[in-house]
Image (spheres, rainbow, N blue to C red):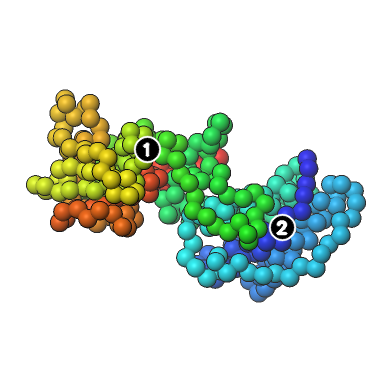
Amino acid sequence: MSRWIVSTDLIDLLATAARRIRNGRMHDGFFDFDDETPTSAVATALFELNYTVVDENYGEETERPEYTFQPVAEILEGPLKPRHLVQIYQAANSYMYQTGGDAPQWAYSLPWATVNAIRFWAEKLLHELGWPIVKQQNTNTYDWAGIEGTEWVWTREHGFPELEVKPGRLDDDQLRETIKSFEIFFEQTLEQMPATLVKSRVSLLARLLLPEHPDAAYLILEPEGGRFARGTVFRDDGERLAEVQAVRLSQEAQEHEASTQLSLVDPDQAASLTEFERQGAVEGPEGSYAIDLAVAAAWSPASRRPRPSE
């Protein structure tokens, strides 16, 4: 198997993630490194192992440049979003591939175990954020949504662009089953719909609308009589594309799934949709909500399930 030297920026990224974990709430002993070990020592160990493995693989000594750990400020200081965490996860995959894999003498090394811990930490946060796991294109494998937009050999020039999540890659049938299970459970225990159920219905609604209206950017939900009576679909420039009329559960409703989902969304619970809000949307009537269709379509409670590899 081929090996190559990863960028020092990638080493910086992983070591910064390690420092972020240690400044957070992970319990003592999460890392194999002693708690007093400075982050620069963690970074140097990652750097040295990478060169050692490459030298061992090719039977020759690679010239080592001088390396000094430089933290990645955006990871160390700002709030971590899925675009940061998926890139950290991918960087950990890249490093582990270059230093572990078919070389068991390195796979159990201290730096390798530390990077494995970083990968676990990134995935744990992605689970908590509700970031979806999707089937990867042209494969039978599943991974974090948007991972195709991350860099295998990351450098600071790549940065952390927003991840593209294609709604068609999400599992709509599983979301329907999630909605059904929520309905059964909460009919027995609570009178009000939980936030997750509201978000699930609006997410499915967005995923039903986008294939019909590829240019759609946002949806304005308009309330009437204690329910959302209609939803108007707009382009990014404010041009009106279509209208969805809510219908009650009936034989007719079974043929209009988007209308059914709309009619079942309770405006009293709509405050849970704040993460779907669209800024700069055409102003709707009082009590209406502007939903960013791309953001809503990308949300999925199914991401809370165990990863297929588990």
**Residue hosting label 1:** 214
Mark before the other along the chain sequence, 1 or 2? 2
Q: Is residue 61 left or right of residue 200?
A: right
The correct choice, above or below, for 177 with respect to 156 in the image is above
Tell whether label 2 touches label 1 (CB within 8 Å): no
Image coordinates of residue 114 in percent, x first then y, are: 65, 59
Quadrant in the picture for residue 28: bottom right
Foreground residue among 52 and 209: 209
Image coordinates of residue 63 in percent, x first then y, are: 86, 60
Element type at marker 1? Answer: loop
Which class describes the residues within 10 Å of circle 2: few (<14), some (14-19), or many (20+)?
some
Foreground residue among 249 and 252: 252
Q: Is residue 134 left or right of residue 278?
A: right
**Residue hosting label 2:** 7
Q: Is residue 204 left or right of residue 102?
A: left
Residue at 47%, 65% in the rendered image: 79
Q: Amino acid at mark 2?
A: Ser
Residue at 74%, 66% in the rendered image: 44
Q: Is residue 206 visible?
A: yes
Q: Where the N terminus falls, by quadrant?
A: top right
Residue at 15%, 35% in the rendered image: 247
Q: Is residue 114 visible?
A: no
Q: Amino acid at mark 1?
A: Pro
